């Protein structure tokens, strides 16, 4: 906790509410940061999200922050709609990989994954990469869910999110705008800062009333 | 509610008055009734019997405790017959135990009951007896096709919870009644068999949840939603043995019991968030509805896809793996929760489920489902079978006979 100088008469009026508000803010922040550490997220992939490649690679690999349980699922869709990922998805520790084979259509490929970490946390997400010289491939992405960073795209799938929306400790949701308004992180910050400002105003008013 | 307590209108009125009395305004309750009603009541008073007086409905040619709506408390006793076991000694044991069970279930003291007062509230007491594979192989005169349960991948079986010769599933809504009944059975069996294990279990206390509500296990899941319904036409064939031939006739009205002691890793489960927990099962935690539905009994849509094109219900979830398009891969589950002290574990307790299932043909109905779950089921990460056994549950005893009589030959 923050230490204040020995209280003098003029400071005592605002120091108490300020301390309370600081403590509240601390609790709020601790409340949403600690479970996040236990959760799984996508650290990266090969090819990376947004990559531009000359040809479709023979394999796609996703790397996560936690060991992944079997089975894991991955789907890679070519610009013409062809499914280019093998049905067999390999899981080894924190890596999930799948063989790719397709007709080699040029354009934007969409790669979606659904995995569950060994400790039971589900992660679903989607990213894109471009094959060939086709210009503006990423911008012309067929999926509105595709986004520039793997972190942001690791948002829960619509169906699952609706069922699990009441889980207050859903770290991925808190890192990611779900497109329907404020994310949980933004909400916590807003409430915390709002309380802080209110406390300050109250303290000032109290001080004036005394003097 | 067959066999249940009957509440007359008068007794309800009286209960109402008693409730008022409890609130300290009992003196005014009689004033609420017209004078003549008060007078009439004095003549025709029927006091509702306590819940403990209720007996479990008599299921005819089947032993009670199979289709009986599960009671609040379970005690499962597994005995091994002593080395000098014989058909005759087993007959004598079953004659004694059947007589105890019959009397106690009716609220009467057992023969030579040292605490007869403890028998007065049966609280739907049922005792269901079964024989293990060794008894059926060595002592029975007919072959009903009982084979040991195979060990499944992932099992960590401890013989301390393993297969025994004889089992009694003792159930009651009242723990005192249950303890007394069990003690009578243990005393009478002592000369013939020794106890290998006792597995206690519990569900919601009587009256806690609405009648017929599906129970919750200690992981918080609604457990047992897709149990076959006694009202459906297939039910009898799924649960009760029938058919032709000498063995089938001797066993007609019997069934088979699968008993698995399933330990839960609740400390690990604590680290799974709500969405993760629901995806492991494929059902919502709040009401047990499939992730594609609204209500507990909604049929799951295993083809429903998320925005990314993945199935809403994970094909590796417990529900998806347990389901089968084969209508014969179903059985009647009757599980109970357990907790026992265990100082070797971080929290000081061992918790889980005493899984009990009844089926007319274990190899056909139960084994394929369990094989599928053992091969792949997200739930396996937090559950582990530590005990496993299977028993033949003979048909009910005749009025003056004993359970198992047709399987153990005529008295010499």
Image (cartoon, coloured by chain):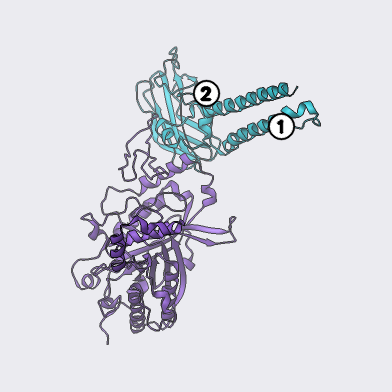
For disc 1, the chain is A
> For this rendering, which residue is in front, A95 or B68?
B68
Secondary structure at badge 2 equals: loop
Where residue A171 sits, quadrant-wise, is: top right
Q: Would residue A7 be seen by someone viewing this image from the given angle?
A: yes
User: Looking at the image, which residue is at 39% across and 75% down?
Assistant: B119
For disc 2, the chain is A
> For this rendering, which residue is in front, A142 or B343?
B343
Q: Residue furthest top?
A: A135
Image side of residue A65 versus residue B405, left or right: right
* Crowdedness near tag 1: few (<14), some (14–19) or many (≥20) residues, C-alpha within 10 Å: some
Q: Which chain is cyan?
A: A
Where residue B127 sits, quadrant-wise, is: bottom left
Name the mark on residue A147: none
Query: Residue B103, relative to residue A113: is it above or below?
Result: below
Q: Residue B76, image x and y in percent?
A: 42, 68
**Residue on which the image places disc 1:** A16
Name the mark on residue A149: 2
Q: Which chain is purple?
A: B
Q: Residue B108, image x and y in percent?
A: 35, 77
User: Looking at the image, which residue is at 79% across and 28% down?
Assistant: A9
User: Looking at the image, which residue is at 19% across and 71% down?
Assistant: B245
Same subunit, labels 2 and 1: the answer reads yes
- For marks 2 and 1 on the same chain, the one whose residue lies earlier in the sequence: 1
In which quadrant will I find the C terminus of chain B? bottom left
Q: Would residue B4 be seen by someone viewing this image from the given angle?
A: no
Q: How far apart in space, not on screen, are marks 2 and 1 (Cα)? A: 43 Å
């Amino acid at each position: 906790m923050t230490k204040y100088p020995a209280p003098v008469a003029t400071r005592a009026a605002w120091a108490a509410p300020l301390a309370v508000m600081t403590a509240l803010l601390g609790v709020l922040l601790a409340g949403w940061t600690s479970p996040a550490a236990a959760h799984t997220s996508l650290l990266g992939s090969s090819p990376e999200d947004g990559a531009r490649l000359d040809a479709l690679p023979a394999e796609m690999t996703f790397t996560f922050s936690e060991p992944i349980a079997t089975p894991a699922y991955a789907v890679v869709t070519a610009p013409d709609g062809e499914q280019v990922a093998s049905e067999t998805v390999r899981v080894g520790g924190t890596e999930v990989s799948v063989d790719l084979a397709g007709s080699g259509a040029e354009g934007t490929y969409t790669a979606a994954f659904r995995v569950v970490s060994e400790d039971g946390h589900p992660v679903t997400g989607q990213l894109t990469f471009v094959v060939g010289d086709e210009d503006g491939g990423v911008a012309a992405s067929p999926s509105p869910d595709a986004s520039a960073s793997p972190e942001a795209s690791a948002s829960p799938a619509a169906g699952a999110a609706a069922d699990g929306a009441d889980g207050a400790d859903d770290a991925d949701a808190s890192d990611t705008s779900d497109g329907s308004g404020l994310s949980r992180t933004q909400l916590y910050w807003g409430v915390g800062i709002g309380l802080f400002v209110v406390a300050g105003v109250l303290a000032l008013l109290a001080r004036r009333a005394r003097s | 509610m067959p066999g249940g307590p009957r509440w007359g209108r008068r007794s309800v009125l009286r209960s109402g008055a008693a409730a008022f009395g409890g609130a300290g305004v009992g003196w005014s309750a009689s004033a609420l009734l017209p004078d003549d009603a008060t007078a009439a009541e004095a003549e025709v008073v029927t006091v509702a019997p306590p819940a403990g007086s209720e007996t479990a409905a008599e299921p005819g040619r089947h032993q009670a405790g199979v289709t009986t709506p599960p009671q609040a408390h379970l005690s499962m006793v597994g005995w091994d017959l002593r080395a000098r076991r014989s058909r005759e000694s087993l007959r004598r044991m079953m004659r004694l135990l059947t007589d105890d069970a019959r009397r106690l279930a009716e609220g009467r003291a057992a023969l030579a009951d040292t605490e007869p007062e403890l028998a007065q509230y049966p609280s739907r007491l049922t005792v269901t007896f079964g024989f293990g594979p060794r008894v059926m192989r060595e002592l029975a005169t007919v072959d009903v096709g009982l084979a040991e349960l195979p060990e499944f991948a992932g099992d960590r079986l401890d013989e301390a919870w393993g297969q025994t010769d004889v089992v009694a599933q003792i159930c009651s809504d009242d723990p005192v009644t249950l303890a007394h009944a069990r003690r009578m059975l243990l005393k009478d069996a002592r000369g013939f068999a020794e106890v290998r294990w006792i597995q206690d279990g519990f569900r919601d206390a009587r009256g806690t949840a609405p009648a017929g509500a599906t129970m919750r296990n200690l992981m918080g899941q609604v457990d047992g939603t897709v149990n076959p319904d006694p009202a459906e036409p297939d039910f009898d064939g799924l649960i009760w043995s029938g058919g032709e031939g000498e063995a089938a006739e001797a066993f007609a009205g019997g069934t088979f019991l699968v008993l698995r002691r399933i330990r839960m890793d609740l400390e690990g489960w604590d680290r799974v968030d709500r969405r993760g927990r629901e995806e492991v099962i494929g059902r919502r935690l709040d009401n047990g509805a499939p992730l594609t539905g609204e209500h507990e009994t909604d049929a799951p849509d295993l083809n429903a896809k998320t925005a990314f094109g993945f199935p809403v219900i994970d094909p590796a979830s417990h529900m998806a793996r347990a389901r089968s398009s084969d209508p014969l891969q179903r059985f009647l589950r009757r599980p109970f929760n357990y907790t026992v002290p265990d100082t070797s574990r971080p929290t000081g307790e061992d918790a889980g489920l005493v899984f009990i299932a009844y089926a007319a043909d274990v190899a056909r109905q139960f084994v394929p489902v369990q094989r599928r779950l053992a091969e792949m089921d997200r739930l396996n990460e937090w559950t582990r079978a530590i005990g496993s056994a299977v028993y033949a549950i003979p048909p009910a005893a005749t009025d003056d006979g004993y359970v198992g009589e047709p399987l153990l030959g005529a008295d010499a």
